[in-house]
Image: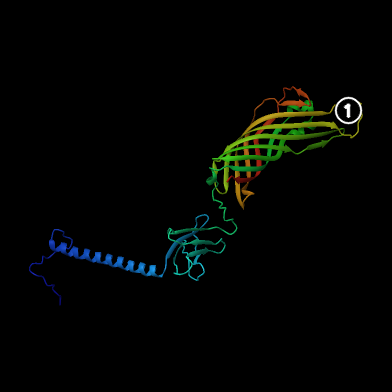
Amino acid sequence: MKRIPYITPNMPVCSNRHQLSVSGCNLYRMSIGEMRMAARIFAVTLLAAVSFVAAAQGTVVTGVIKDNRDVPIVGATACQVNTSNCTAADMNGIFHLLLETGRDMSLKVECLGFNPVEVVIDESTVYPLKINLTPIYIPDEQFPDDSYSDFRNKVIMRSSLTMDAIFSDFEEFTPALGSHNTDLMRYFAVIGPELGASFSGVYFGLGIGMGYSYQDDLDTISVDLNNTLYKLTIGYDLVSSRRIRITPLLSARWLRYRLLNYPGDRKISLTRYLDERDIDLRFNQTIAVAGLNLEYLMYSGMQGRSDYWSFGIASGYAVKLNRNPWIWSRGNRVMTDHCIGLNPLTFSLTVSYYNIAR
């Protein structure tokens, strides 16, 4: 049997509970609002009661534990010093701990593989605590960063050992010097140090290179060739990440060839020496090279020695700055119309050490 609700004569009946124009409906909505208000008051009262109980027991500490790269450390423990009162960080590195009253108001935060940290809790403590742990293989005072670009506003010193290879051609000098000389001068290879510095991504460097001593012993004479390179380089870090550095470079280079021909015998007569007249020529050629340098960076973490180091390879396009070489023979300037041929393709290999100025 269906139950019929009791309706008084003065009580309006709402056929639609959403009709706002009917006063009876407004009475229905007011009752719901009062219920919600009562629920809020109850929640606030309950929260105040819980806070009162917590305050009576001790201080609730909330914090976030991360590593030196700002990555949350899951499972890191936070313990009240000199107690067994501990908790562990969740997957976001967040922890909550109720400190016991009458004990040391300090936290010891630790995790396997990281240096522990101790935090003192007092009235000035701001929550949530932000705690960073550093790996045990990194000194506490050193925080290597993931990106080379983070150091753009600092001076970065660069020390490199560079091998430069340039392909040249002395074919025009063959009738005068002989093929036994010009065959040794087909390419120019040197190795040496380069010192430079970067600031705001702009690089300046000075380098010197010395070539291997090429020798060839013929029947009556010995041929010896020595190469020397001086260069000035400027560049800009187009790409600069934790592992990759790409730098367009523009360099001016001074190539010096020293060609020696001397009698092969250790002891010769003065007459023979004057007749054969040994050669001591110094060829000087300047070039400009525009190229691209690619480096792979590796971080050492050795403070005071190097912040990171790299292996690099560079390639460029070379053009001559002077058409004819400048030639000296001891104290004489030697005039010539011949030119040194130059292959425009050049390349370099480098091993570099970077130190960040602090």
**What amino acid does circle 1 point to?**
Tyr
Point out the residue furthest to the left here. Answer: 9
SS state under label 1: helix
**Can residue 46 be seen in this snapshot?**
yes
* Image spot of residue 308 (x, y percent): 61, 49
Identity of the residue drawn at 69% across and 29% down: 285
Relative height, residue 52 to residue 158 (above, below)? below
Query: Toward which corner of the image does residue 214 lie, by quadrant?
Result: top right
Identity of the residue drawn at 70% across and 40% down: 192
Is 13 left or right of 274, judged from the image as shown? left
Relative height, residue 112 to residue 341 (above, below)? below
Q: Nearer the viewer, residue 217 or 64?
A: 64
Query: Toward which corner of the image does residue 314 lie, by quadrant?
Result: top right
Q: Quadrant of the N terminus?
A: bottom left
The residue labelled by disc 1 is 273
Q: Nearer the viewer, residue 105 or 192?
A: 105
* Image spot of residue 62 (x, y percent): 43, 62
Is 243 left or right of 279, judged from the image as shown? left
Is 153 left or right of 167, judged from the image as shown? left
